[in-house]
Image (cartoon, rainbow, N blue to C red):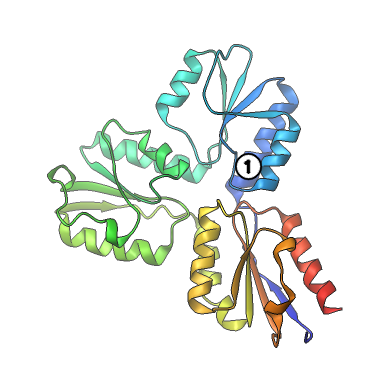
């Protein structure tokens, strides 16, 4: 294998919201004996293991909560979930990403002004479910151009759009163009977060400037999936890996330059291990 030049994207790895959620989780469990979460704090197996090792218990449903803390994950939660937890006696520690909290504020404000809400995002993603959970009326969720209703329901002729914070900017732009042509009164809030925008800007140039691209992140990570899809569309020698264990030397045959990026919930040590593995292969 030829000598490789390795470049790591400036935006690779933990975003502000993930760092904050992990910091809050570890600080909470250091002070409270019983801390529970409904699901994983973020979409990364290493981080999930770290949190569980610290003593935070993942549960599927709420039970008697007296003396317990319920940690709200970075993706946020529905209002009814928090209300139920408080009724059961839980103390709430809210680690929802501030960018996601801003989306919650927008949809509640718009609904109070008489707008129905449209969410551009993955229907089954916890963030989207949490956004829907702020509303009195059910939102219209759109995950692709193909999922836009041919006939928009009459109730949504006065609507406000928000976007799951990790969506693909280009896809969102196309969806909004179509919605504008079909909806009389449409208020658009592009709530893709700054960290996601920066990652996507980098991933539009890196695959063209490198022979091989590695995208590091969990298979459950929506933002990692989008980075991979963009990279693959620009460079067929783009590979989605979860750790250095997934690297195959044959990928780098004839390559001189390797670019690396990582999803918002990928730990720094995972990125370092990938770089170290490439350097060993190159020795």
Picture quarter with the C terminus? bottom right
Residue 255 x %, y %: 69, 85
Residue 238 x %, y %: 59, 73
* SS at mark 1 in the image: helix
**For residue 93, which quarter of the picture?**
top right
- Asked if residue 92 is positioned above or below residue 9 in the image, the reply reads above
Q: Is residue 95 left or right of residue 163?
A: right
**For residue 184, which quarter of the picture?**
bottom left
- Asked if residue 50 is positioned above or below residue 280 in the image, the reply reads above
Residue drawn 31% across the image and 66% down it:
174
Residue 1 x %, y %: 78, 84
**224 and 219: which one is in front?**
219
**12 and 270: which one is in front?**
270
Q: Is residue 270 left or right of residue 20?
A: right
Q: Which residue is mark 1?
A: 20
Residue drawn 39% across the image and 67% down it:
170
């Amino acid at each position: 294998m030829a000598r490789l030049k390795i470049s790591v994207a400036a935006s690779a790895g933990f975003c502000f919201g993930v760092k904050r959620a992990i910091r809050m989780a570890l600080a909470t469990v250091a002070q409270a004996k019983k801390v529970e979460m409904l699901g994983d704090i973020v979409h990364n197996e290493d981080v999930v293991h770290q949190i569980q090792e610290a003593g935070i218990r993942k549960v599927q449903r709420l039970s008697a909560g007296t003396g317990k803390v319920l940690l709200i994950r970075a993706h946020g939660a529905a209002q009814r979930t928090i209300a139920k937890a408080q009724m059961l006696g839980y103390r709430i520690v809210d680690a929802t990403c501030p960018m996601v909290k801003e989306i919650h504020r927008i949809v509640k404000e718009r609904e109070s002004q008489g707008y129905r809400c449209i969410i551009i995002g993955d229907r089954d993603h916890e963030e989207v479910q949490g956004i829907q959970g702020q509303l009195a009326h059910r939102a219209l969720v759109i995950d692709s151009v193909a999922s836009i209703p041919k006939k928009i329901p009459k109730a949504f002729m006065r609507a406000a759009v928000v976007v799951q914070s990790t969506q693909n900017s280009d896809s969102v732009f196309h969806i909004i163009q179509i919605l504008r042509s079909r909806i009389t009164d449409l208020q658009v809030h592009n709530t893709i977060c700054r960290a996601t925008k920066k990652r996507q800007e980098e991933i539009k140039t890196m695959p063209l400037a490198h022979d091989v691209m590695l995208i590091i992140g969990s298979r459950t990570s929506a933002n990692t999936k989008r980075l991979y899809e963009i990279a693959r569309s620009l460079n067929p020698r783009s590979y989605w890996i979860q750790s250095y264990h997934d690297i195959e030397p044959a990928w780098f045959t004839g390559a001189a330059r390797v670019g690396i990026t990582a999803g918002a919930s990928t730990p720094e040590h995972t990125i370092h291990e990938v770089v170290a593995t490439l350097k060993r292969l190159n020795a």
